[in-house]
């Protein structure tokens, strides 16, 4: 009956051939963790810590952060929770990290660059994360935003290791990191592709500017080719490659991303059910064939049309 259906456990994300594709949640606050778990999130693929402190003039204390992180980790016992260190700048300015005026903040001192310039703030965040990790049972992974060089990758791996944080990785959301993914993943424990920024920087179109909004389409084959490079590098090094941008919430694009080598998908919890259902319709071979059709297209609209056509194999 209906009630039984509502209470039935949600099955884990998987393709039709049984290939697991863990489906994770993007969260900006621990408040939404229980709702995400109820919608079948198998963990958290992106916890945006900067959302906790957007209106603060001063950097949060270790204690203040630790309370937030413990609450989050306690909602996912035994499950993977990927926490991103502060991604300040451009669309998410933090008063205590972005105090200088910049004409082009999207190309400025943001993400890991800003944290590195105020390393004490990064160290306090890593301290709070390590304390929360020790006090809870979730499987905590940490990652750095806006990493654009192999040198930055090595920097973050080294500093996270100082705090005993187990699985540090990097976001791939700048084309330079995708193009050098084979080198980045020689050092990073995993990659998580942020398709929102990766699209913005690949198409040179401000993600917040309506007049160029049509360019902000992750179906663009230029973006898909970068995702493929990261997927191949992940396979080569035996390291996970997640997707945590909005692209993962598009049910057909999610199939394409898995076909390009993504091993986990993270999205707004409201998108989980549709993506889970879509993945169940295709095998890994199907996903690769659908991805190949999209990759061969000239533009975003053509890629979507080609992928759609490829979902029905020719007679
Ligand atoms: C992204 O850029 O795709 C991403 C997931 O990070 P954010 O949207 O928070 O910049
Ligand atoms: Mg981003």
Image (cartoon, helix red, strand yellow):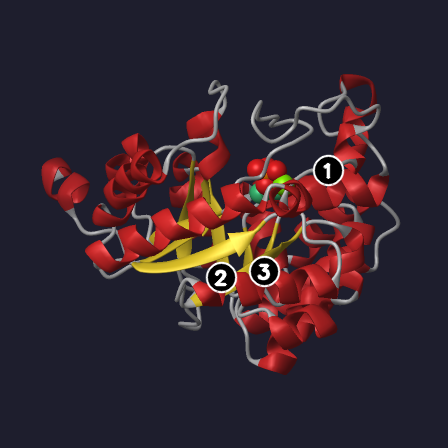
- What residue is at 67 percent from the left and 24 percent from the top? 99
Residue 289 % position (x, y)? 68, 67
- What residue is at 50 percent from the left and 23 percent from the top? 54
Q: Quadrant of residue 20?
A: bottom left
Distance in Å between CA atoms under marks 1 and 3: 16 Å
Q: Residues within 10 Å of mark 3 (few under 14, many from 20)?
A: many
- What residue is at 23 percent from the left and 45 percent from the top? 75
Residue beneath disc 2: 160
Distance in Å between CA atoms under marks 2 and 1: 20 Å
In the image, farthest residue toward the front = 120
Q: Quadrant of the N terminus?
A: top left
Q: Quadrant of residue 104?
A: top right
Note whether 303 is above or below 237 in the view shown: above
- Residue 279 in the figure: left or right of residue 65: right
Q: Quadrant of the C terminus?
A: bottom right
Residue beneath disc 1: 109
User: Considering depth in this image, is 31 or 87 the residue closer to the camera?
Assistant: 87
Count of numbered circles on the image: 3
Q: Residues within 10 Å of mark 2 (few under 14, many from 20)?
A: many
Label 1's element? loop
Q: Is mark 1 within 8 Å of ligand 2?
A: no
Residue 105 visible in the shown view: yes
Residue 315 visible in the shown view: no
Residue beneath disc 3: 156
Residue 50 % position (x, y)? 50, 33
Residue 228 % position (x, y)? 71, 64
- What residue is at 35 percent from the left and 47 percent from the top? 128
């Amino acid at each position: 009956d209906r009630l039984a259906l509502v209470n039935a456990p949600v099955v884990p994300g998987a393709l039709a051939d049984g290939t697991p594709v863990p489906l994770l949640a993007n969260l900006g606050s621990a408040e939404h963790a229980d709702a995400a778990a109820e919608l079948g999130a198998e963990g958290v693929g992106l916890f945006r810590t900067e959302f906790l402190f957007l209106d603060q003039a001063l950097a949060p204390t270790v204690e203040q952060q630790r309370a937030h992180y413990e609450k989050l980790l306690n909602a996912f016992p035994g499950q993977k929770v990927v926490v991103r260190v502060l991604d300040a700048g451009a669309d998410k300015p933090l008063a205590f990290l972005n105090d200088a005026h910049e004409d082009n903040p999207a190309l400025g001192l943001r993400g890991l660059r800003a944290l590195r310039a105020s390393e004490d703030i990064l160290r306090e965040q890593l301290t709070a994360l390590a304390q929360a990790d020790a006090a809870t049972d979730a499987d905590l992974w940490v990652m750095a935003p806006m990493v654009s060089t192999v040198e930055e990758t090595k920097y973050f791996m080294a500093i996270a290791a100082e705090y005993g944080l187990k699985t540090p990785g990097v976001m791939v959301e700048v084309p330079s990191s995708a193009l050098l993914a084979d080198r980045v993943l020689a050092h990073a424990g995993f990659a998580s592709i942020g398709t929102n920024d990766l699209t913005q920087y690949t198409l040179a179109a401000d993600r917040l500017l309506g007049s160029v909004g049509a360019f902000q389409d992750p179906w663009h084959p230029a973006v898909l080719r970068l995702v493929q490079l990261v997927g191949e590098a992940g396979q080569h090094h035996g390291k996970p490659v997640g997707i945590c941008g909005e692209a993962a919430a598009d049910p057909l694009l999610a199939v394409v991303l898995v076909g390009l080598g993504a091993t986990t998908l993270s999205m707004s919890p409201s998108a989980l059910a549709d993506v889970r259902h879509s993945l169940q319709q295709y095998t890994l071979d199907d996903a690769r064939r659908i991805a190949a059709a999209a990759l061969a297209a000239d533009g975003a609209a053509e890629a979507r049309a080609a992928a759609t056509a490829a979902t029905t194999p020719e007679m």
